Image (cartoon, rainbow, N blue to C red):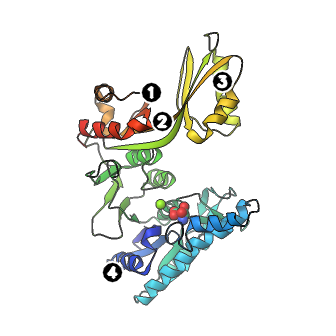
Amino acid sequence: MRIIVQKFGGTSVANPESREKAVAKIIKAKNEGFSVVVVVSAMGRNGDPYATDTLINLAKSIGAPLDFRDLDLLLSCGEIIAAVVMAQALEKAGYPAIALSGGQAGIVTDQNFGEAKIIGINPENVLKRLGEGKIVVVAGFQGVTAGGEITTLGRGGSDTTATALGSALKAELVEIYTDVEGVMAVDPRIIPEAKILRELTYQEICEMANHGAKVVHPRAVAIARDQKVPLKVRSTFTEDIGTLIGDGKPTRVITGIAHQVKIGRVLVKAKNGQLTPEDSVKIFKVLAEAGISVDMNSISPGQVGFVVKQEVLDKVGELLASDDFLVELLPGCAKISLIGIGMQDVLGVMARVVETLHQHDIKLLHTVDSEITISCLVLEEQMEKAIKVLYNEFGL
Ligand code: ASP
Ligand code: MG
């Protein structure tokens, strides 16, 4: 059996016109001889009756404390409704289809309601229905615990359903259908002429997703990378071939630029000038115990620097307030990350980044790098300019 998994996001299943486009993609794959598994997100966006945000607001409007277990039960309905509607649309087009909830599709998760992790998939039911010649439409974003409780996988989790199912079913291809034509080298809202990347490596897409590129969920691409699931990102609404993700070779130094906003920078020094290793341990322990995640960490003899989400910046200030420390808090920062597996073998990339930003009077607040990523922290008001000049410098 040649299996393909096709995932359609909220805008692709929102209304009869968009569903018609999605149905055409599904039928095309079916007619090419694939056994097709469709994964759907909830229909539409905030304000649409069955969209995830609408359901969250409904639960909130009651005014009682939100119980995550009950909330998951409610949110799972959004995708279940979308699955049944898509199965009906396929039936209407003359193609036998069946809708399954995540649990019915064999997706088992841990009990972390609201952010559950898939711990196993039993593909038996899906394979049986495919064997009967049906198109199987699975509700994304959800699973079931070993004890039978319904869970959701965290916002954007339908992508994860798709790559996890693709892996469990040994699919030939997983296609993520969305409202853009592929993964862009840079956010087109900043660079309108940004190009679609035709080929990307797993490593690059993982870095891009982790550093703020929004097209595919980080967890979904991590599964694709670890299980070597061939992945495509493409549009429901055009014939464009989209972006293919696999084990490619580097063809350029920098592949793309991702960015994240609403970041706060923290610098900690000792009042007596002597920040000890014990102090560093204490700083990071206090934050970990408070459940605050830190990024861009750097420890040097005189100081500790890192960034956090801006919304927790004041809390960090309170937690670290002591007679021994000088704590500097800077809100309004943005992190720009240049990503490319090609940079591993090239000297002077950092020099070009620093020189380009300096030439354009962009203040570099902090940098960190890994083998395929250089991240720069700048002020939010300088972010767009920084992205533009780096985009030009590296000829993206
Ligand atoms: N409907 C869920 C959300 O809005 C899951 C998804 O769309 O992937 O987060
Ligand atoms: Mg999404």
Q: Which of 140 and 230 is in front in this view?
A: 140
Name the mark on residue 31.
4
Which residue, given by chain and number where applicable, does mark 1 sit on? 365
Q: Is mark 4 on a helix, strand or loop?
A: helix
Which residue, given by chain and number where applicable, does mark 2 sit on? 333
Which one is closest to the eye, mark 3 or mark 4? Answer: 3
How far apart are labels 2 and 4 at the CA level? 50 Å
Look at the numbered disc 3 and say if its residue's Cβ is closer than 8 Å to ligand 1: no
Q: In this view, does 286 lie above or below 39?
A: above
Q: Which of marks 3 and 2 is nearer the N terminus?
A: 3
Residue 319 x %, y %: 70, 30
Q: Which of marks 1 and 3 is nearer the N terminus?
A: 3
Q: Earlier in the sequence, mark 4 or mark 1?
A: 4
Q: Is residue 28 above or below residue 287?
A: below
Is residue 103 in view from this perspective? no
Q: Which residue is drawn at 45% across and 46% down?
A: 212
Q: In which quarter of the image is the N terminus?
A: bottom left
Q: Which of 201 and 42 is in front in this view?
A: 42
Label pair 2/1, CB-CB below 8 angstroms = yes
Which residue, given by chain and number where applicable, does mark 3 sit on? 281
Horizontally, residue 8 falls left or right of residue 264, namely: left
Identify residue type, mark 3: Val
Label pair 1/3, CB-CB below 8 angstroms = no
Q: Is mark 2 on a helix, strand or loop?
A: strand
